[in-house]
Amino acid sequence: MSSRPVDAGTPTDRRQATARLLEIGDLPIARTEIELTAPKAELVFAEEVVQPRKIIALVRVHTHPVGVVVLDGTRGLSWQTHAPDVWKMLGERVNAHLADDGLPTVLHPDALTDPPPSAHCRRNRENVLAQAPLITVVIATRDRPKSLYTCLVALLRVQYPQFEIVVVDNDPSTEETSTLVANMDNSKVRYVRENRRGLSSAHNCGLEAARGEIVAFVDDDVVVDRHWLTAIAEGFAAAGDVGCVTGLILPAQLETPAQLLLEQHGGFDKGFKMRIFDTDLNRPSDPLFPFNAGKFGSGANMAFDSAVLRRLGGFDPAIGVGTFARGGDDLAGFFRVVVARHQLVYQPSAAVWHRHHRDMVALRNQAYGYGVGLGAFLTSALIHEPRMLGALIRRLPHGITYTFRASSERNRGRYDGLPDELAGLEKRGVLIGPAAYAISRWRSGRGYAGACPDTTGS
């Protein structure tokens, strides 16, 4: 067995490649990172794994991700053992990065060096950091202090000149979160409490408390990369009127069958190429645009221009985890930014690692919640942007095929190897979504808390 790439074109292709290469018998699967300009003698793992059979490696050049590869752990942990395979798979992308930097290409990874002052990626980063905007990071959490602590530790190690962290304690049942934040004794971290249950309400509370020009949102089960905020700032500088930046989300753990199945189900990966979306020059050819907002990114790793998000009224409190509608708040945010004629940038260098649910019950709830959230998002989109009704009606036949047909781009290979019930749960959820939104909107208007405690989390 040799090393193989898993970043192979479209998200569907990557999902199918991952499903072929990662198997239940390989668990636990180790995770590592490789910076090609400074590779180590041996691979170093993010978490301790004894003699892994397979290894997922995020490969970078000049700190920028260029791809993910699956390595054969049975061949040993020496970098020199795996270097030829990694280069064979990703050397073309590395040289594309060098060409964009105005640097000569190389024939092997040993010839790579740190970027010189003339390199485009270095100059761009220096220019962004010279005028670094204040960024507020909002973490919405509920009764998960251990997960939150891990998230906070990673955030406080981020290399960025000026940022603050707002922890929003959403309808807590204990004082553990407030005690944790108080004991951290760090001026960057502030605690606020939002008693109305729901992720959107928590995010709106964080937005209200934010002092930054940019407000970034992460889930409490996420570990951010040390360059995360710098890459977000670079994303906002990538075009003239950026309202939102999303980033790369990779699995922090692949230790249980449920975690592996979720990654095979598609995970959150949107690829390794920066993309700009808008309704003008950067309008994609996809006939479902902009209703297919899931292609823009995911709520576990998203940032907004604070002023833009406030003008849009923040997030719809009737949708999101913790409400009857379960999800879709991130999609509605992306949709409204694009429809308001701002640009949305997908920035793969803004990388985070997400801890997937560990058990099958949570995976089933998540599949159903995704479906309900999608249906609720579309309903919310029309409530807040009624002028888009005609556009939705024109796209409806294609959208039905895309969502429900097994051979569609969205579903092709999506459920391979998964329990048969997951596909049905997700599709049933889509149909229930509009009614769930109506109930959630009514409950939200009357001040009710959410009714789905089993959906707490991401």
Image (cartoon, rainbow, N blue to C red):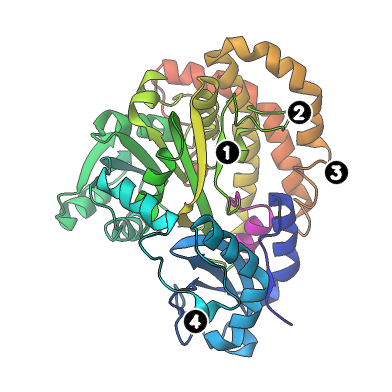
Residue position marked by numbered label 1 in the rendering: 296
Q: Earlier in the sequence, mark 3 or mark 4?
A: 4
| Residue 157: x %, y % from top left | 28, 61
Q: Is residue 225 above or below residue 177?
A: below
Q: In terms of sequence position, does the residue under pointer 3 or pointer 1 come before the other?
A: 1
Residue 121 x/y as whole percent: 43, 55
Is 238 left, or right, of 127 in this rendering? right
Q: Earlier in the sequence, mark 2 or mark 4?
A: 4
For residue 407, which numbered disc appears in the image? 3
Say the numbered circle drawn on residue 399: 2
Label 3 to label 4: alpha-carbon separation: 39 Å
Type of amino acid under label 2: Gly
Does 119 sit left or right of 374 as displayed? left
- Against 74, is 108 above or below? above
Label 2 and label 3: CA atoms lie apart by: 13 Å
Residue 345: in sight, yes or no? Answer: yes
Magenta region, residue range: 257-270
